[in-house]
Image (cartoon, rainbow, N blue to C red):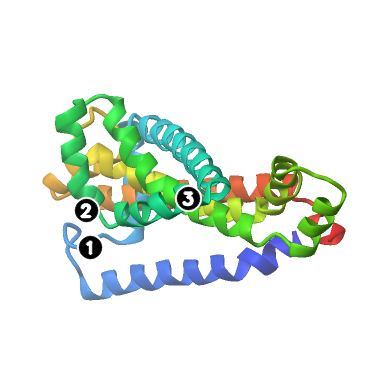
Amino acid sequence: MRTFWQRGGKSFLFLLFLFILWEVLVRLTETPKWLLPAPSDVLKEATVGFDTFSGHIFPTISLALIGLVIGSSVGLIIAIILYRLPKVNELFYPLLILSQNIPTIVLAPLLIIWFGFGMLPKLIVISLVCFFPIVVASMDGFRQTAPELKHYMQMVGASRRQIFWKLEFPHSLPSIFSGLKIAATYSVMGAVISEWLGAKAGVGVYMTLAQSSFRIDRVFLAIFFIMLLSVILFGVIRLIEKLLVKGRNEGA
């Protein structure tokens, strides 16, 4: 409990202070609700209109999780291929960097035209925003393996494959999880963006309908949920990281 307070307690208090300040300023300036709702208005909408909002929660969560798993798996496979095959790395790595310069909001309509309004274009959008952090973080982790350990394994007759799977890959786990934590936040963003462009349900659909009807309190409710979901995914991956990489620093 004490560790939690040291790490997150002060941030929570500061966030609470910002909400209180927001509430006070909105009330003092008498800002219209359609322009900027107070946090209490957003909280009221979360309780009164939960039945409306709840139907959009699960589609976004499932879409973000499936896209995160696919994007992370593809990113890790690409990173292994590029690291194990230097010539392929020289050819394709610049193309991967260029692929990240294409705005997702521009690419998404094309994917819908090519693949329709089903699940496939949405998963492609999420995978595209998730795989690159995994590729970069994983390759950095592979390269940061201690040279003396690699040299020792070569001396005892380990093959290139054994060196990778028994030394380089385990050593890169902290870097891989760093990429996963970034990709987790991106997956929620990608899910919402894909829902903007064509979906029957989801937080992105809820947000679009709220904007069109000037229900800004509902827009902020969707924003807060997106932030909360991103934090939860980040925390889950961090917990898994602690379980899998536990004791690594002590062992080193």
Where on the picture, by quarter, is residue 194?
top left
Can you give x and y, in whole percent of width and height, for residue 81 in the image?
52, 42
Where on the picture, by quarter, is residue 213?
top left
Q: Nearer the viewer, mark 3 or mark 1?
A: 3
- What residue lies at 36% left-to-right and 30% top-to-bottom? 59
Q: Nearer the viewer, residue 248 or 80?
A: 80
Picture quarter with the N terminus: bottom right
Q: Is residue 44 above or below residue 202?
A: below
Can you give x and y, in whole percent of width and height, for residue 244 in the image?
73, 45
Secondary structure found at label 2? helix
Give how far apart the Cα atoms at labels 3 and 2 are: 52 Å
- What residue lies at 55% left-to-right and 50% top-to-bottom? 83
Query: To which residue does mark 2 refer?
Result: 216
Residue 175 appears left or right of 206? right
Residue 132 appears left or right of 171? left
Binning the other alpha carbons within 10 Å of mark 1 as few (below 14), some (14 to 19) or many (20 upward) gives some
Tell which circle, 3 or 2, labels the residue nearer the N-terminal end. 3
Where on the picture, by quarter, is residue 191?
top left
Query: To which residue does mark 1 refer?
Result: 36
Task: Look at the numbered discs 3 and 1 and tell me whether their residues touch, using CB distance below 8 Å.
Answer: no
The amino acid marked with disc number 1 is Leu
Q: Report if residue 228 is visible in the image.
A: no
Binning the other alpha carbons within 10 Å of mark 2 as few (below 14), some (14 to 19) or many (20 upward) gives many
Tell which circle, 3 or 1, labels the residue nearer the N-terminal end. 1
Can you give x and y, in whole percent of width and height, for residue 137 in the image?
54, 56
Binning the other alpha carbons within 10 Å of mark 3 as few (below 14), some (14 to 19) or many (20 upward) gives few
Give how far apart the Cα atoms at labels 3 and 1 are: 54 Å
Residue 133 appears left or right of 216? right
Query: To which residue does mark 3 refer?
Result: 87
Can you give x and y, in whole percent of width and height, for residue 147 in the image?
74, 63
The amino acid marked with disc number 2 is Ile
Task: Look at the numbered discs 1 and 2 and tell me whether their residues touch, using CB distance below 8 Å.
Answer: yes
